[in-house]
Amino acid sequence: MAIDIQYATESFRKYLTSYDAADDKIRLKIVHTFCVKRASEAIAKRLNLSEEDRQLAVLIGLLHDIGRFEQLRIYHSFIDAETVDHAALGVKILFEDNKIRDFIIDDSYDKIIREAIANHNRYAIEDGLSERSLLHAKIIRDADKLDNYRVKLEDGISTMIGRGITEENLGSFDITDAVYEEAEKKVSILSSLRKTPMDIWVSYIAVTFDIYFKETLEIISEENYIRRLFDRVPYTNQKTAARMAKLLDLVLAYIRERVDSDDKD
């Protein structure tokens, strides 16, 4: 049975009527959901996937953050470490509460959808996935990150990093050696390593090193996301400014190299 994206989207909009779209946090997650849906489609098209896998990628993009809405209703927070893993909550809603049948009647895709959503927010994808589940886990992880570049450019700095932190003062903070050294290794930053507001900002940019497909990196390059993120903040701390200049060169060179080579293993 074909995947009916229009049906799934209409059903998702009905699901959202249980939540207050006037709440800014809910509204932002609705916007994010539909942006990730579009990003998933864009990546799948660039990968030249079959129509079936393109539609499956779009469906996963639509459903990947379904747990966020219930997370906010119960805990009034999106901070997983202080509340609940929103991906695991999404899997529960879809497959234990059987909400998945509201979005797709055919159950033959359930394992792929479950595994992709469960892995979309982890530091690394779990071992043991089938080739197709791994493909879709990689697509949704890339699509989620792709829209998060937009989010980091549009959202208020204090909303993202903490009360009292602004575009004007963020660049006055140090980048800790541990975080800088991880970025130099071209790896994403563990949350536990982040100690300063600038550590958090660097971690937003370092997710680039966790992008799987060169096709995603092509979109990042076309949108000029990296330079725009670097340029958003005035780095008044001299040491921080020097480190950020080096990181900008490092990230842009990494993107160029990856785009000209094969996909990430």
Image (cartoon, rainbow, N blue to C red):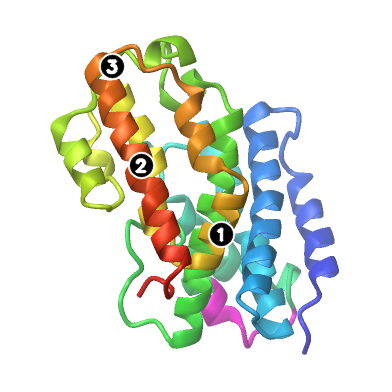
Residue 242 position in % (x across, y down): 27, 25
Question: Which amino acid, by three-letter code, is at mark 3?
Answer: Phe
- The spot of residue 41 in percent (x, y) is 69, 66
Residue in the image at 32% along x and 25% along y: 198
Instruction: Answer few, some or many: residues within 10 Å of disc 1's Cα (few below 14, many 20 plus, some between 14 and 19).
Output: some
Picture coordinates of residue 77 (x, y %)? 49, 33
Q: CA distance from mark 3 to mark 1?
A: 31 Å
124 falls in the magenta region: no
Residue at left offset 62%, top offset 46%? 223
- Label 2 element class: helix
Looking at the picture, does residue 61 appear above or below residue 149? below
Q: Residue at x 41, y 25 (%)?
A: 161
- Looking at the figure, which quarter contains the N terminus? bottom right
User: Which residue carries the number 2 mark?
Assistant: 249
Question: Mark 3 sits on what residue?
Answer: 173
Residue behind mark 1: 218
